[in-house]
């Protein structure tokens, strides 16, 4: 139960044990070992002299034939996957590493070295298997994210009975029942009940969040202690966690630039190694040397150098509630020199409070709130939320305006009983430092609403941390008035600021800078998120927009995740560099030793795989060693 209750346990030690157990249980593993066992089995037959029945038929060579037969079976079992991949490569006219190993195995067989052929196949497949295991350990966080979500839920029928349905059969608008300790299976809104929710898996936030009727809940989070009825919003692949899963899956398949370089080189690698092997053979007349060259010449560890650290880093980020859409974004992030931030909802909490209402021209505060709230019903902007909750507090009946038009970065306009109402950004000359909106009724000024939005607690620390990472050039870009932006810039320590920007003006400001990281909340700043070299969205507010437009999405509002991610990306890049150098050095030394006859084919196979496993193990360290500064 504990395992299910807390995402942390699941992601921590347990997932690794699960991964290993799965590895040793897998049928691939059984096949490799079975194939390998034919080698000692063959020798047993050889030494036990089981040749009494065929031996005489075959001029006393029976026991050699039996030994080679067993070895051939071993080659067949373990060499088959390698040769299959090699043939695939040949058919696609693409050079791949299995081709080298296949040539080596074929050369061994042609040379009559059945034992070498069997051992090399065995070590090669076992090696890739271990690599796979270690890298899936690095992926642990991702994997447990995939597995956590239940595939069925209890749906409340009209007659009050419960029925278990598969996630995909559940319809939007149905009510599901979630008991204490259960993982919430769908995105939706609580209609009944209250509880503490553990959102660690989705947001990385370890503190439980308290939720009651009307609050949204997300699939993949855990109902710790209450009985809930939830109206289904999205489920399965459409839920937030479903979308995150598919994003991470595609991120794993995307490659970092480092590997694209590697791919280019792989085209030269194989012919080069084949040539070296051929020359070695001709010069030395020793087929074993040539075979050893082919075996150690595979650039396997080179090929793993980029993708494995990238996957480890993406997994580590996911564990803290950061969704990175691909390794290449981390690579870009590592090189970032400047950063720009959106104000509302990013540097500030995005929960503005109304501090003052100043009616003009004979209108009343009630009237202002009444008409303003009627058009704000059509907006998702944080200011709309503040106006609507004010209206609720003042017991103003909110009439929904018609023909509501959202003016991005400016405000809203709509019509209320034939009157045109506008709520738009104001210039604010009365209370410097506050956000100000003008309320306009049929073209005439009806009054001002003044609001304040607190700067997030983590903002100042984040700015300091970014400076210490060498990102000194930071600016605050906002559609809000200059005074309010200045105040937020001072409070957070961001050096430069610019206010009164419309979404496209923000984007232009971002485009002007190179190597720029832009952090926004997805509301009125999607163009900037896209224009920046790397766009990071604070997902909690506009999760859906953000998931689509940003390169990176923070599932919780802790700004310290940004410097953490910069450090993670730099770590990833340095590990990739170490890997590339290390694997190149190992390969070159091993090839040279092989040409000199100092490395046998079997020893070559061992060295080769140790190189790959080393690369993978170093890469896994990306995931293990970094902490968010606040936790440290
Ligand atoms: P930021 O760039 O700081 O995130 P926005 O671009 O979201 O700010 O908004 C800029 C300004 O436009 C706000 O400060 C506000 O004055 C005005 N505004 C935007 N949307 C609304 C709205 N729905 N109601 C009232 N004013 C709005
Ligand atoms: Mg914003």
Image: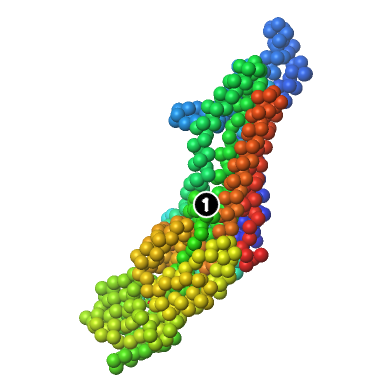
Task: Name the residue tied to disc 1.
Answer: 331
Q: Residue furthest right?
A: 48
Q: Nearer the viewer, residue 91 or 142?
A: 91
| Relative to 443, 341 lies left or right | right
* Residue plotted at (62% across, 45% down): 578
Question: Percent position (x, y) of residue 602?
Answer: 68, 27
The picture quadrant for ligand 1 comes to: bottom left
Q: Is residue 592 above or below residue 493?
A: above
**Numbered-mark total:** 1
* Residue plotted at (60% across, 50% down): 574
Within 10 angstroms of label 1, few (less than 14), some, or many (20 or more) residues? many
- Image quadrant for the C terminus? bottom right
Q: Is residue 226 above or below residue 448?
A: above
Q: Is residue 529 above or below residue 399?
A: above
Q: Secondary structure at mark 1?
A: helix
- Image quadrant for the N terminus? bottom right
């Amino acid at each position: 139960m504990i395992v299910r209750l807390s995402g942390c346990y699941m992601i921590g030690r347990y997932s690794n044990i699960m991964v290993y157990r799965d590895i040793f249980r897998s049928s691939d593993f059984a096949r490799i070992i079975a194939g390998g066992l034919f080698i000692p089995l063959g020798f047993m037959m050889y030494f036990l002299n089981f040749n009494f029945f065929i031996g005489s038929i075959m001029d006393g060579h029976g026991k050699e034939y039996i030994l080679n037969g067993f070895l051939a079976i071993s080659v067949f079992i373990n060499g088959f996957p390698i040769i299959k991949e090699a043939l695939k490569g040949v058919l696609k006219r693409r050079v791949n590493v299995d081709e080298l190993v296949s040539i080596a195995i074929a050369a061994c067989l042609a040379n009559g070295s059945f034992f070498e052929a069997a051992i090399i196949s065995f070590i090669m497949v076992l090696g890739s298997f271990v690599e796979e295991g270690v890298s899936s350990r690095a992926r642990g966080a991702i994997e447990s994210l995939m597995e956590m979500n239940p595939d069925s839920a209890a749906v409340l029928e009209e007659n009050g009975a419960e029925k278990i349905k598969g996630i995909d059969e559940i319809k939007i608008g149905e009510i599901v029942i979630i008991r204490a300790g259960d993982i919430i299976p769908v995105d939706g809104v609580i209609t009944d009940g209250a509880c503490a929710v553990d959102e660690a898996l989705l947001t990385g936030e370890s503190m439980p969040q308290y939720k009651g009727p009307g609050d949204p809940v997300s699939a993949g989070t855990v109902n710790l202690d209450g009985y809930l009825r939830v109206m289904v919003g999205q489920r399965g692949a459409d839920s937030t966690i479903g979308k995150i899963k598919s994003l991470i899956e595609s991120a794993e398949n995307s490659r970092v630039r480092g590997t694209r370089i590697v791919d280019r080189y792989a085209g030269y690698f194989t012919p080069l190694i084949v040539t070296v092997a051929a020359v070695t053979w001709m010069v030395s007349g020793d087929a074993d040397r040539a075979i050893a060259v082919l075996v150690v010449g595979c650039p396997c560890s080179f090929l793993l150098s980029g993708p494995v650290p990238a996957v480890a880093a993406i997994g580590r980020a996911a564990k803290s509630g950061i969704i990175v859409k691909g390794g290449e974004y981390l690579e870009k992030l590592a090189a970032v020199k400047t950063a720009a931030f959106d104000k509302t909802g990013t540097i500030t909490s995005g929960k503005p409070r109304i501090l003052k209402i100043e009616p003009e021209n004979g209108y009343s505060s009630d009237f202002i709130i009444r008409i303003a709230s009627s058009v704000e019903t059509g907006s998702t902007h944080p200011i709309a939320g503040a106006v609507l909750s004010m209206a609720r507090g003042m017991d103003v009946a909110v009439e929904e305006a018609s023909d509501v038009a959202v003016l991005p970065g400016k405000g809203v306009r709509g019509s209320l009983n034939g009157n045109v109402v506008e709520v738009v950004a104001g210039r604010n000359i009365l209370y410097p430092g506050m956000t100000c909106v003008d309320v306009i009724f049929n073209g005439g000024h009806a009054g001002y609403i003044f609001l304040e939005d607190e700067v997030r607690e983590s903002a100042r620390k984040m700015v300091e941390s970014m400076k210490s990472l060498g990102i000194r050039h930071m600016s605050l870009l906002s559609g809000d008035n200059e005074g309010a932006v200045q105040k937020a810039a001072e409070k957070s320590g961001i050096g430069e600021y610019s206010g009164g920007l419309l979404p496209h003006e923000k984007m232009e400001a971002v485009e002007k800078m190179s190597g720029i990281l832009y952090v926004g909340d997805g509301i009125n700043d999607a163009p900037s998120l896209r224009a920046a070299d790397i766009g990071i969205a604070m997902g909690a507010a506009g999760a859906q927009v953000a998931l689509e437009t940003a390169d990176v999405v923070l599932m919780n509002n802790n700004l310290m995740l940004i410097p953490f991610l910069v450090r993670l990306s730099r770590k990833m890049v340095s590990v990739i560099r170490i890997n590339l150098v290390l694997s190149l050095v190992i390969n070159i030394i091993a090839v040279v030793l092989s040409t000199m006859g100092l490395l046998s084919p079997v020893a070559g196979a061992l060295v080769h795989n140790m190189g790959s496993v080393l690369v993978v193990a170093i890469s896994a360290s990306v995931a293990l060693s970094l902490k968010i500064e606040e936790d440290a």
